[in-house]
Amino acid sequence: MDLKIFDRMESEVRGYIRSFPVIFNQARGSLLIDEDGTEYIDFFSGAGTLNYGHNNPLFKSELLEYLAADGVVHGLDMATSAKKRFLQTVDEVLLRPRKWRYTLQFTGPTGTNAVEAALKIARQVKGRPNIISFTHGFHGVSGGSLGATANAKFRDAAGYALGNTTFMPYDGYFGPDVDTMAYMEKMLDDPSSGMDKSAAVIVETVQGEGGVNVATLRWLKELEKVCRRHDMLLIVDDIQVGCGRTGSFFSFESAGIQPDIITLSKSLSGFGLPMSLVLMKPELDVWKPGAHSGTFRGNNLAFVTAAAALRTYWSDDAFTLDVQRKERLVRDWLENLAHSYPGSGLAVRGRGLIQGLVSTATPELANAIARKAFERGVVIETSGAHDEVLKFLPALTIEDELLQRGLDAIEASVADALTESGHSARILKFGGKR
Ligand SMILES: *Cc1c(COP(=O)(O)O)cnc(C)c1O
């Protein structure tokens, strides 16, 4: 496929085009179709932006009707009918059933803008500049968010010193035997630990970009307690693993914690339309009118599809149960695969429909598998500090048949990549679950 115009005109900064060097032309559900008509099964979902698939027909019709009726498309933060319906839907579907009280702030449409707002609120409310973030955390690439993002590739691009953040070890950072929350609390308790008092802690319950690292529910509960004991706000960045990725709408629900601030974006609009939201406890709303602005805070097309997505999938627990069923399917399949290659060092981790096949011993294996998978028609990415984790992020709505076809292509790619890397392709099938 002729990619010359992209090479000639676009900055070197381009990324995913290098992993998937074709020209995509159409997308439907869990399929991406290139200009030659070749179909690819999407196990990437726009890094978690397409939880309900591409062009979901359940909301596409509403979007088309809204446009046909000349509904407001751009509205700054003015009141519009689409925004009213979205607010009503959040109240009815998300907040009231849970008996939660949160004030909503619409920010510029990227996730990083929601994080910027969350950090500003926390710093204003507590009057302290410092924030605690975690190793391998990813919160976006604009100034404030970048300060809380751990990856050196992104930090080095800033060109100035990033500060006002202390990084603490995430759950499992030193292996299963070290309680990193006990370590953090010891640092906070000790007035001579050298650690500045912080306004807030920002955390992902499952680190998406950081390599599918999963915080245990116990660790998250403990984190909430530590925040309360040390007068710090708890910010859950649910931009990647919220909106149903782990089964429930919010990723922290199974931990039973109540964050002070929640950031949402990626799959919030349900349609791949840009939109971001901050939920804050009402008493934290210290904003002066207009103090955090943004031209594109009112993407009304996103409000239309976001409300439709909430009503369609989150009015009862049927969708959650289906995501949990698919989680078991993918998880069993991955564990079976890892067991089939004893000595390969492959391991599995994840929660819900974000699962990682981890190759710590030979990090390059993950990228080799991803490349071979693409040749076999599957779009899948790697993540982690050394790109050592093959990250499974199918649409939550993927049909079982496509899911299975994608997994079969991955299995063949794993076999190829292992054979090429000299690993004996001795296959021991366990359990016959596949
Ligand atoms: C993607 C992501 C962001 C940043 O969102 P952008 O829209 O790329 O700015 C922030 N936090 C998490 C957890 C993310 O996955």
Image (tube, rainbow, N blue to C red):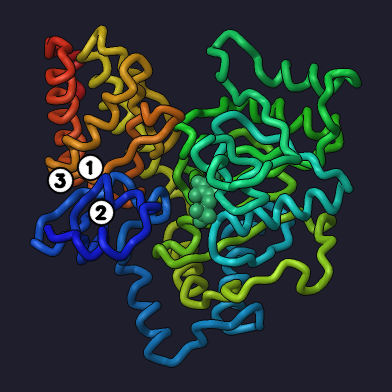
Q: Which residue position holds label 2? A: 30
Which residue corresponds to the image point at 13% horizontal and 20% vertical from the top-left? 420
Which residue corresponds to the image point at 66% horizontal and 18% vertical from the top-left? 180
Q: Which amino acid does label 3 sit on?
A: Gly
- Mark 2 and mark 3: Cα distance apart in space: 12 Å
Position of residue 92 measured from the top left corner of the image (x, y, whole percent): 60, 64
The residue closer to the viewer here, 324 or 120, is: 120
Q: In this view, does 340 lie to the left or right of 290?
A: left
Q: Is disc 1's CB within 8 Å of ligand 1?
A: no
The residue closer to the viewer here, 19 or 4, is: 4
Q: Which residue position holds label 1? A: 403
Position of residue 412 measured from the top left corner of the image (x, y, whole percent): 13, 29
- Mark 3 and mark 1: Cα distance apart in space: 12 Å
Residue 352 placement: quadrant: top left
Sequence-wise, the earlier of marks 1 and 2 is: 2
Q: Quadrant where the N terminus lies?
A: bottom left
